[in-house]
Image (spheres, rainbow, N blue to C red):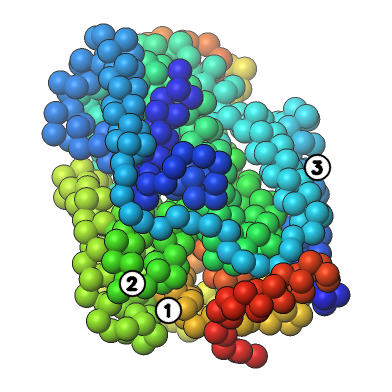
Amino acid sequence: MARHQFAVLSLIAIALASTFWFLLDVLGTATHKSQGLSVAGFEDRFNDLRKTVLPHAVYGYLSDNPPTDPSAMPEFHLTQYTLAPAIIKLSPTEDLVIVNYHSKQLDPKLLQSNRLAAIRDFGNGVVLCRRISR
Amino acid sequence: MTLLCLAAIWLVGFGLVRWMFPRPVRWSLHNVWLFSLGIGAGAGVASCLYFLVLLLAGPRVTVLVASSGAAIAMPLAIGAALVILAAGLLTRRKGTELQWSDGPAVPWYLTAFLLLAALLAVTMFLGAVIYNPHGDEAAWSVWNLRARFLFRAAGFWRDAFSSDLTWSHTDYPLLLPGLVALCWKLAGQESTDAPIAIAFLFAAGTACLLVTTLGALRGKAYAWLAGTVLLGTPGYIALSAALYGDVPLSFYILATLALLCLQDRRPQDLHPQDLRFTALAGLMAGFAAWTRNDGMMFLVAMIVARVFAVFRFGQRARLGPQLLRLLAGLAAPLAVVIAFRLRVAGPSGLLSPPASAIVKHLADPARWIVIAQGLVVVLFTFGRFLIPMILVLALFWYLVRFQVDARDRAALATAGIALALTLAIQLSVDLFYVDNLPVEIGTSFERVLLQLWPAALLTFFLASGPLQLVASNSQGKLSKEKKAGRPQRRAVETR
């Protein structure tokens, strides 16, 4: 009987202690403000643009994130998530391109090098641009 | 409103499974088991119907709902739910009633630990989803993105599977996105409540299903223990709060194997009506394939395992009727999956490499080593336990040992082979097709093991020997059984 009790209590103790430890982590994360990517914050930034997009529309996407930045792809995915049902392509060669920038001012060189002209600035680092034809 | 929609879908599932296994409405193991199964059945049926309506009459139905809002859609849904529920409640027919299996007396602390594990799990889940209501990246970039397209795009819902979105796995089936979009459609608004509530229901349903099934097969002590271990798996609860499709898939894998285990306790020559267990197992396996592509791998593995197990351990004459019921059960969801693949789904990025690339992958010994290393590491780290759970289970086995009831041989063979084969298929797919193996191992190996975890617990505890936790009560109970002339367990030591 003691063997069985020890076996059962070992299983339960490890499971409950692990859960309790992990719970502390979860609550610790939840109660501290994170510097990471926040879906709600991102949706707020894109909210004004979202009101103007139409289903079935296709937009290009350009960001000032370096390609090696780990948040570059998640931000592109979040842009698609926020602006669905429009389709967002990771390319600045569409007629309409959404520019997502993080600096205080949009770098004009970024637009020039990609042959883009700003149509409307939605604030919060979100600009809708049109591709300049040659 | 969203929660009301989900309750209606749950009641549809409960009505359906109760129609198959009717028993009086009262507080009993049987009805808790039906309630647990009802979550998966309702979700699967609702999601399949939503997809079929969208596919066959999409824009028209979408316009109807969009123009009249939830005012029409919601009463219609609740009405349909009530009709199916009434059919389930009013059905009278012969059949099995699941009851607690004879087992050792349950000490008070087992019950207390189960309740504590449930409390901790709920707290952890709520803490995670309040902090992160959209779930982790794969949730919003795959599952909820698809749901948003289905809900927002009206007539352009097929844009969700555009070739421009292949990065979001447009070949993944639609049980979860369809269910979320249906809830939003019926509620008339989009909110994170739907995916969160669905994730919670599936996690709670899986725990309840594991507890009730083991309660019927092995008694309360093993039921409480398995429930505590599952709810005490931090990785599993975190995966549920991440709003991925893995926990719903784990529900369907567990449900399929649990139903087959129950089937083997009810020999069909004595209880021909109980082949319903196998038919419902087929339905659940079909819903597994409608949840994730991994579910299709499980479906194939389960059929192979079942054929082998019945052929080897059961009576061969039972194979035909069981296979027929299994196929009958999975026919409808499988037809939906095939329709989705042929008419809607985007190309699978995984299976696109040419044969030469696959041969190159196979011939590279480094890939085999990386896979083997990854598997060993994940086996020791999965679930985020403080001490590797595989070691604790090994200790449990050493102290309690396996003792397989002769009636459970076929069921255990089915479950063991199906789980091992599913894992082997998953590893083979990674070996053949995936280019960046270290990334794949880091992101998906643990999730694959957690998909199989509830069913693995069922298998482990079904095979374990009888527990003796309380001296006087259990001995008294055993001697009473002997005096009453009850049949003893025909057991096979596998020491």
Residue beneath disc 2: B270
Q: Nearer the viewer, mark 2 or mark 1?
A: 2
- Res. B315 visible in picture: yes
Residue located 86% across and 75% down the image: A2
Q: Nearer the viewer, mark 3 or mark 2?
A: 2
Q: Label 3 is found on which chain of the structure?
A: A
Residue beneath disc 3: A24
Left or right: residue B213 compared with residue B80: right
Q: Which comes sooner in the sequence, label 2 or label 1? A: 2
Name the quadrant containing residue B317.
bottom left
Left or right: residue B164 compared with residue B99: left
Residue located 33% across and 72% down the image: B270
Residue A105 or residue B449, whichever sits in front? B449
Q: Secondary structure at mark 1?
A: helix
Residue beneath disc 1: B410
Quarter that holds the N terminus of chain B: top left
CA separation in Å, label 2 and label 1: 17 Å
Residue B116: percent from left, percent from top:
76, 46
